[in-house]
Image (cartoon, rainbow, N blue to C red):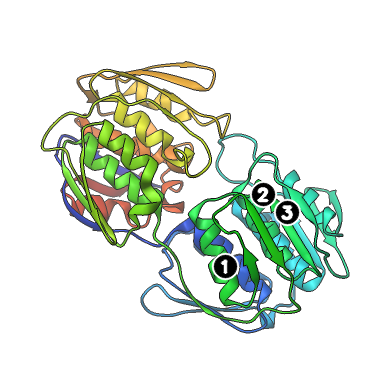
Amino acid sequence: MNQLLITGGDRLDGEVRISGAKNATLPILAASLLADSPLAITNVPHLDDVTITLTLLRSMGVEVTVGDHLALEVNSSTIREFIAPYELVRTMRASILVLGPLVARFGRADVSLPGGCAIGARPVDLHLRGLEAMGATIEVENGYIHARTKRLKGARILMSPVSVTGTENLMMAACLAAGETRIENAAREPEVVDLARCLSAMGAHIEGAGTDMLHIEGVDSLHGANHAVLPDRIESATYLVAGALTGGRVKIKNTCPDMLGAVLIKLQEAGGTIRSNGNWVEIDMQGRRPQSVSIRTAPYPEFPTDMQAQFTTLNAVAEGAGTITETVFENRFMHVQELVRMGADIHLEGNTAFIRGVGKLTGAPVMATDLRASASLVLAGLVAEGETRVDRIYHIDRGYECIEEKLAQLGARIHRIAS
């Protein structure tokens, strides 16, 4: 098993290219199951979660061709199985996204209940209730979801609470349902909008993407298309935070500034000078220590839960005191214990972390517990005195493409080593 070895204390300076968004790629790959001809996808990130999803599709008989320059062609006309087995699904919750497309196009699906990061309960009840409202028969037995239907029918579905994967799954299913489906309190995340763009290019009739009300008029069939995945806003924000907490200057390219509004506001509050234009954003701290900020996570367009851990690290070394309140997941502060081992002053009360910035962190061996927690520990290692070893980095490889190479481009001393 590999580790990341980081020697802290360097101010980051330079430019880095942002990869395609993992959280857009995975549902788009699932959407390929809806098409009767090949779907071509570009700007695909090379990540473990993408590899697992491609393995899952291939296990069903789907033909996947990997081309140059981060391109894929996915042809589901060769599918012969409608099963998502536990062996593949257990490592990644996003695998539930094949459920809606399989039921909508083929009338059947047997999908294992998913696994993934240990950040609290993320129930699939919303997915199942939505499919039942559309006429599917659902049974959960021996750890598997068994769904059957002759053809789904349009329905009115209320997402309560709002769910990104729930919205995506039901939106995909509705594309081939008979009649109109209305999804209320729909997720508004850019990744949902990107999926809707792809589905529309495939022939779907979708209105309201990016709002909390989706209208989908079902069609008899969808076809292949060409689609470029949007940039990863969480990777973008993570590298900007790396620049902020090291007092450096970091420019990210191939990104979308409009998706980063809530994060950029907090980085400005932390003392960063933000410049952006078109597809790039730059933060310049001019050697200054960041100021503490207070945040409260909430669904898009509010502050993203996937950036909570990284800002916890920023506050740990900032001037002053700040609070971070987590409202999306109930168990997403497991990185705090590891940061405290490095010298952070953090006190937890319920779903709020009270953080008083310290003058320095000290390098230590730390263990990642989930994807974004692992990123926060890497960031802590960048500013800690001495060496930090981050273990269980398979988490970070699920969501960050070549993180050690990109940080090294910015001047960090970071290496992947065998443990």
Question: Crowding near pointer 1: few (<14 within 10 Å), some, many (20+)?
Answer: many
Which image quarter is the C terminus in? top left
Residue at the spot x=25%, y=25% of the render?
318
Q: Secondary structure at mark 2?
A: loop
Mark 3 against mark 1, which lies toward the viewer?
1
Question: Crowding near pointer 3: few (<14 within 10 Å), some, many (20+)?
Answer: many
Q: Which mark is residue 29?
A: 1
Q: Earlier in the sequence, mark 3 or mark 1?
A: 1
CA gap between label 3 and label 1 equals: 18 Å
| 299, 395: nearer the viewer | 299
Please say if 294 is above or below 195: above
On the image, the x and y values in percent for residue 306 come to 46, 41
Question: Mark 2 touching mark 1, by CB under 8 A?
Answer: no
For badge 3, the amino acid type reads Ser
For badge 2, the amino acid type reads Pro
Q: Which mark is residue 112?
A: 3
Q: Earlier in the sequence, mark 2 or mark 1?
A: 1
Residue at the spot x=61%, y=73% of the render?
32
| 153, 288: nearer the viewer | 153
On the image, the x and y values in percent for residue 217 come to 72, 68
Question: Mark 2 touching mark 3, by CB under 8 A?
Answer: yes
Residue named by callout 2? 114
